Image (cartoon, rainbow, N blue to C red):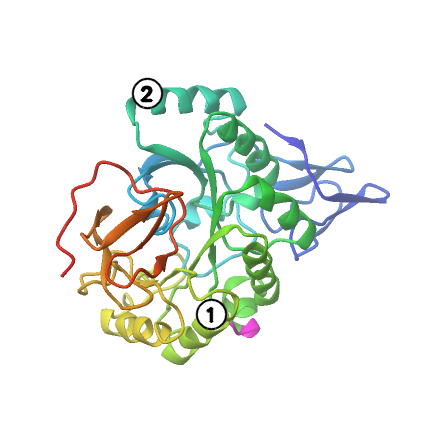
Amino acid sequence: MAVPALYQEPLGEGVVRCHLCPHQCLLRPGDEGLCRVRRNVDGVLLAEGYGRMAAVSVEPVEKKPFYHFHPGTWTLSLGTFGCNMSCNYCQNWTISQRGSGEGEPFLGRQEVEAQIQELKARQPLLRSIVFTFTEPTVSIEYVRDVAAVAREKGLFVLLKTNGFLSRQPWEELLPLLDGANIDLKGLRDEYYVRQLGGRVGPVMENIARAVEAGLHVEITTLLVPGDFDRVEEVEAIARWLAGLNRDLPLHLPRFYPDFQRGGAPAPWNLLDEARKAAQEHLHHVYIPGSPLPAAGDTFCPGCGTPLLRRRGFRVEPTTFLEEVAGGSYRCGACHAPLALKGSLASPIARTPGL
């Protein structure tokens, strides 16, 4: 299904400029954008990937990863096709580097509404919907429509994004969201341009705007051996994020070779060094799926007492985590507040704090 695309500017003689992302694609009739899902058809820009599903699943919210947003709950993950970047190591390249998904299953507003009703009956811990797997903002028309349905059905709306979006679309999208996990893949524009097919400036600006707007924000940074693997660069990212808010969670997942990128997975010791360097600036730094001790645990930002332990995607509060009036949380040892958005899934058995 194709719908008229937002953020298009007719320039005459059938030529259209797309203002959705910083690429600002100039499209003649028949041309498609770098995202592969926005096409000029007879002088009108169409969003061709609307509602075509690349992936649908119900998962723990921690898998996205969101560690500080309603921990222990479940989320409905929806993924359409396309991406406006071209990371040479993309884990989902078979759907992100593909066109509109014509012929794939369609999940429109009514279908999503019915699925939410069914899922809520079967999974009482379903709390949110997340647009993920590829780059959801290239199908922003779909995100906006389905976000409204999710809100009507009492679900929170989350976004897993590369953050490479123009200012106006981003600012108009923010009020529709409850949280976003944004990839910050480095601070060097040369790396973004050469290896990722984007630019870092717009991403940093959009992170800052999201934080300023009060959105729940978590950040993901991938260390890529041979390209982006200097601990000093991760520390620089953490230092910059701390200037926005020291409570921003930073995730350092392990790199695995894929798509056009060979080599070995990122060494665990490299991730551990990067985590320790980032912790000099940020309160909460994680290595998702790590065998390293406590690499997924949440500690008190004041005294370092463990407050949440993670075993896989299972979240276990320790006896030191205290809930206070208004549904917020604090450390029972020093009473420092813990930056959590929303309540923990209940009931969850508590574990010893030490």
The answer to whether 93 is drawn above or below residue 254 in the figure is above
In the picture, the quarter occupied by the N terminus is top right
Regarding mark 2 in the picture, which secondary structure is present there?
helix
Label 2, on which residue? Answer: 121
> For residue 48, what is the image quadrant?
top right
Q: Amino acid at mark 1?
A: Ala
**Disc 2: CA contacts within 10 A as few (<14), some (14-19) or many (>=20):** few
> For residue 353, what is the image quadrant?
bottom left
Left or right placement of residue 62 versus residue 212 in this view: left
Please give the label number shown on residue 111.
none
Residue 251 screen position, x and y as percent: 36, 60
Asked if marks 2 and 1 touch (Cβ < 8 Å), the reply is: no
Q: Determine the residue positioned at 25% across, 70% down.
A: 267
Left or right placement of residue 5 versus residue 234 in this view: right
Q: How many marks?
A: 2
Regarding mark 1 in the picture, which secondary structure is present there?
helix
The answer to whether 339 is drawn above or below residue 115 in the figure is below
- Which is nearer the eye, 57 or 340? 340
Q: Amino acid at mark 2?
A: Ala
Residue 259 in the magenta stretch? The answer is no
Label 1, on which residue? Answer: 242
Residue 247 screen position, x and y as percent: 42, 62
Which stretch is magenta?
186-190
- Which is nearer the eye, 318 or 99? 318
In the picture, the quarter occupied by the C terminus is bottom left
Q: Main secondary structure of the magenta part?
A: loop
Left or right placement of residue 80 versus residue 301 in this view: right
Left or right placement of residue 326 versus residue 353 in this view: right
- Whether residue 21 is visible to the viewer of this picture, yes or no, is yes
